């Protein structure tokens, strides 16, 4: 009788564990950058374009199986736009549709590729953002990228991959925000 109850409990826990598997990544870069950059009496527009050929963020490849794909819970371009708009506003930049300064950011790459084996995994993360700033007279284009590898035992943990991706994205967005070159080019 005790074994039957124990088996039932283990079965329930196993089923509940499978039911709570993540289906999406939460992309939420946490910017903690203190910047000396301040936009005094400057205005701009900000647009974000996702140039990637596929919408997923994570692809987990298994031997002789189809890849498992995970997308973000919210479109990554919306998350980047909201994060940068808030941060630029704190730096004094005002947003107006009629502004001469036009900031365009293209998401060229945002992917975590995981090679999952029986006893371990290896992951490669790559994020590439191209920033184009047209100040009404000239255009400045700069590419920001962040790459990294990791590996671990057993199965890749989506929560760990998500945290690492958010840290890398936050790092890139911080680089954009503290860029003296972009600041000096803004009219």
Image (cartoon, helix red, strand yellow):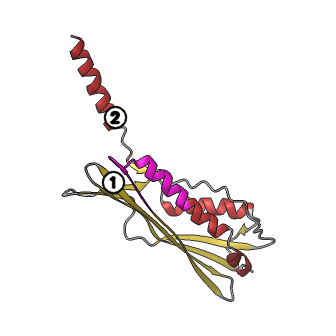
Q: Residue at x 28, y 25 (%)?
A: 10
Which residue reaches farthest left?
64
| Mark 2 surroundings: few (<14), some (14-19) or many (≥20) residues within 10 A | few
- 38 left or right of 133? right
Quick check: 29 above or below 128? above
Residue 73 visible, this angle: no
Which mark sits nearer the N-terminus, 2 or 1? 2
Q: Residue at x 63, y 69 (%)?
A: 176
Magenta stretch containing residue 5, yes or no? no
In front: 54, or 5? 5
The percent coordinates of residue 81 (x first, y second) are 58, 63
In front: 9, or 105? 9
| Mark 1 surroundings: few (<14), some (14-19) or many (≥20) residues within 10 A | many
Q: Tag 2's secondary structure?
A: helix
Quarter location, residue 33 = bottom right
The percent coordinates of residue 114 (x first, y second) are 35, 58
Q: Which disc, if any, is residue 28?
A: none
The percent coordinates of residue 72 (x first, y second) are 44, 55
Quarter of the image with the N terminus in it: top left
CA–CA distance between discs 2 and 1? 21 Å
Which residue reaches farthest right?
40
Q: Tag 1's secondary structure?
A: strand
For the magenta stretch, what is the residue range? 149-169
Q: Which disc, if any, is residue 121?
A: 1
Q: Residue at x 45, y 73 (%)?
A: 51
Q: Which residue is mark 2?
A: 17
- 78 left or right of 1? right
**Circle 2 or circle 1, nearest the eye:** 1
């Amino acid at each position: 009788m005790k074994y039957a109850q124990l088996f039932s409990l283990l079965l329930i826990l196993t089923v509940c564990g499978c039911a709570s598997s993540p289906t999406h990544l939460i992309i939420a870069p946490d910017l903690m950058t203190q910047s000396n950059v301040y936009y005094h009496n400057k205005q701009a527009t900000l647009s974000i374009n996702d140039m990637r050929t596929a919408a997923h963020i994570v692809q987990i490849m298994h031997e002789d199986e189809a890849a498992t794909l995970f997308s973000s819970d919210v479109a990554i371009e919306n998350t980047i736009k909201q994060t940068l708009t808030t941060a630029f506003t704190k730096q004094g930049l005002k947003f107006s549709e009629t502004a001469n300064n036009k900031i365009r950011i293209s998401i060229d790459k945002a992917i975590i590729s995981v090679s999952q084996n029986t006893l371990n995994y290896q992951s490669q993360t790559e994020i590439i953002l191209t920033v184009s700033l047209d100040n009404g007279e000239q255009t400045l284009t700069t590419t920001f990228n962040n790459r990294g590898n990791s590996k671990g035992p057993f199965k890749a943990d989506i929560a760990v991959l998500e945290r690492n991706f958010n840290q890398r994205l936050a790092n890139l967005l911080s680089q954009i925000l503290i860029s003296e070159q972009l600041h000096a080019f803004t009219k």
